[in-house]
């Protein structure tokens, strides 16, 4: 049996490599020639622990190869991006492009799995798209299923094996055949449902977290107004046996939690009011942080510098994409262009291009950023910042968006 994995990104390549490690013949497909060449050399074009070892071994064994062309295969796993459009609806063009390339290769009894995080109905949309291109296969046995991934970057090779998996079929038979494929490497429970429920389950998991973070962020804004320490408030409330409030911060980043709820909202705009409001609440937090800094600048007088600590979207990672910290640093620097912004991010050694182009921003080490500044804005709760000797903060105006230095 041959499996084609379409899209060799953060999810597709690990999935391809783990299947190949179980002896399945896997052909990875990607539109990027650099990715295809890297994989064929046994290399990984991004950082993910352990993935290198898997890819190198599978390529050496001949079980994994990569191609720009979609091949004939018994099963297809589509793991391409689903970004959102300006109006917050999902952009299905990558999924449609994958379907267009798969369609001519089909003979009628293949399994096509959509793994990309998708709005409800996307698997059916992919099936309809393929069948519109291949009406001759309409009553043959093509199978379509959705199997969302829920792995945490940094732990992908472990969680692919140990996490439970939801498998949703357009038909019950499709779910069963897809389950058998995932069983080759997944040791968690494999739960069968229909495709739309599987699509929603993934979106709901991330919306659940978004709504709960929004609650914490709203509490932080209310508490500031009332002169209450929100972290003490949450800690006290969480002593209740049925209360577990998450942590407020400078906003919600990453590629999942800040995106997926919009797919629910755009599917049911009238009904999804709480889910929409959570997105609005979390997205408004960076502007609130900037207002706090503006007030501090007014008190501090002229000729002051601001130390911005952290750019990553969460603690102890180097990922700056969709990070509220990056957008806060950028907006601050542009709004107060006569104020020096000393950015410290121990996990990177160059500024992202959106910040590098701004003249009053520079990347320096943490000690220097603090020593040279009157205002210290903590945006990410990196361990490196936790370990700082607090005496360096003496005499500084500290704005701690993570409650790390209370
Ligand atoms: N955050 C807070 N307060 C909190 C928790 C998080 O402000 O109490 C912020 C973080 O700082 C960060 C953002 O939320 O900016 C998201 O971080 P995260 O750790 O909550 O989630 P991700 O984006 O790294 O990974 C999530 C996970 N989903 C859930 O926990 C429900 C992961 O399991 C998914 O696989 C991943 O999304 C995904 O790919 O969908």
Image (spheres, helix red, strand yellow):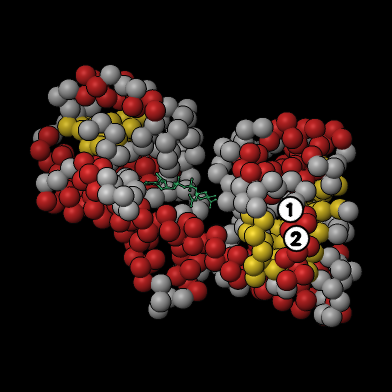
Point 82% across, 80% down: residue: 138
Residue 227 left/right relative to 265: left
Compute the Cα span from label 2 to label 1: 6 Å
Image location of residue 275, percent across then percent down: 39, 66
Image location of residue 106, percent across then percent down: 86, 67
Q: Closest to the observer: 346 or 268?
A: 268
Query: SS class of the residue under badge 1?
Result: helix
Residue 234 left/right relative to 205: left
How many numbered circles does the render carry? Answer: 2
- Crowding at dot 2, Cα within 10 Å, few <14 / some 14-19 / many 20+, comes out as many
Point 77% across, 48% down: residue: 184
CB atoms at circles 2 and 1 under 8 Å apart? yes
Q: Closest to the observer: 274 or 96?
A: 274
Is the CB of mark 2 within 8 Å of ligand 1? no
Residue identifier under label 1: 182
Image location of residue 58, percent across then percent down: 81, 37
Point 17% across, 32% down: residue: 397
Rendered position, 137 above or below 305: below
Rendered position, 348 above or below 247: above
Quarter placement of the C terminus? top left
Query: SS class of the residue under badge 2?
Result: helix
Q: Which mark is residue 123?
A: none
Residue 61 appearing in the image: yes
Point 36% across, 55% down: residue: 212
Residue identifier under label 2: 178
Q: Quadrant of residue 75?
A: bottom right
């Amino acid at each position: 049996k041959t499996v084609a994995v379409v899209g060799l990104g953060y999810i597709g390549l690990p999935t391809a490599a783990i299947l190949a490690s179980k002896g399945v013949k896997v052909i990875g497909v990607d539109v990027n020639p650099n990715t295809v060449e890297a994989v064929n050399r046994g290399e990984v074009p991004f950082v993910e622990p352990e993935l290198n070892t898997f890819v190198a071994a599978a390529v050496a064994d001949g079980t994994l190869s990569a191609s720009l062309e979609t091949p004939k295969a018994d099963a297809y796993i589509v793991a391409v991006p689903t970004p959102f459009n300006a109006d917050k609806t999902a952009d299905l063009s990558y999924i449609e492009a994958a379907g267009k390339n798969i369609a001519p290769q089909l003979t009628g009894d293949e399994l096509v799995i959509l793994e990309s995080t998708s709005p409800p109905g996307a698997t059916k949309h992919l099936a309809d798209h393929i069948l519109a291109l291949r009406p001759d296969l309409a009553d043959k046995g093509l199978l379509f299923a959705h199997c969302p991934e829920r792995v945490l970057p940094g732990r992908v090779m472990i969680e692919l094996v140990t996490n439970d998996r939801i498998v949703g079929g357009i038909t019950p038979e499709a779910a069963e055949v897809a389950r058998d494929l995932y069983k080759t490497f997944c040791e968690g429970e494999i739960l069968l449902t229909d495709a739309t429920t599987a699509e929603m389950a993934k979106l709901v998991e991330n919306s659940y977290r978004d709504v709960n973070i929004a609650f914490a962020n709203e509490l932080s804004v209310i508490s500031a107004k009332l002169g209450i320490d929100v972290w003490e408030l949450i800690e006290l409330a969480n002593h209740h046996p049925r209360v577990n409030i998450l942590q407020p911060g400078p906003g919600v980043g990453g590629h999942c939690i800040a995106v997926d709820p919009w797919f629910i909202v755009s599917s049911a705009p009238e009904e999804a009011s709480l889910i929409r409001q959570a997105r609005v609440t979390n997205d408004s937090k960076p502007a609130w942080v900037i207002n706090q800094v503006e007030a501090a600048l007014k008190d501090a007088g002229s000729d002051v510098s601001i130390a911005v600590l952290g750019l990553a979207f969460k603690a102890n990672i180097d990922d700056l994409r969709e990070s509220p910290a990056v957008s806060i640093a950028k907006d601050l620097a542009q709004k107060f262009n006569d104020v020096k912004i000393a950015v410290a991010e121990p996990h990177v050694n160059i500024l992202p291009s959106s910040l590098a182009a701004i003249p009053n921003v520079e990347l320096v080490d943490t000690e220097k950023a603090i020593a040279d500044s009157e205002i210290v804005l903590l945006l990410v709760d990196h361990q490196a910042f936790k370990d700082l000797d607090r005496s360096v903060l003496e005499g500084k105006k500290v704005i701690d968006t993570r409650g790390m230095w209370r």
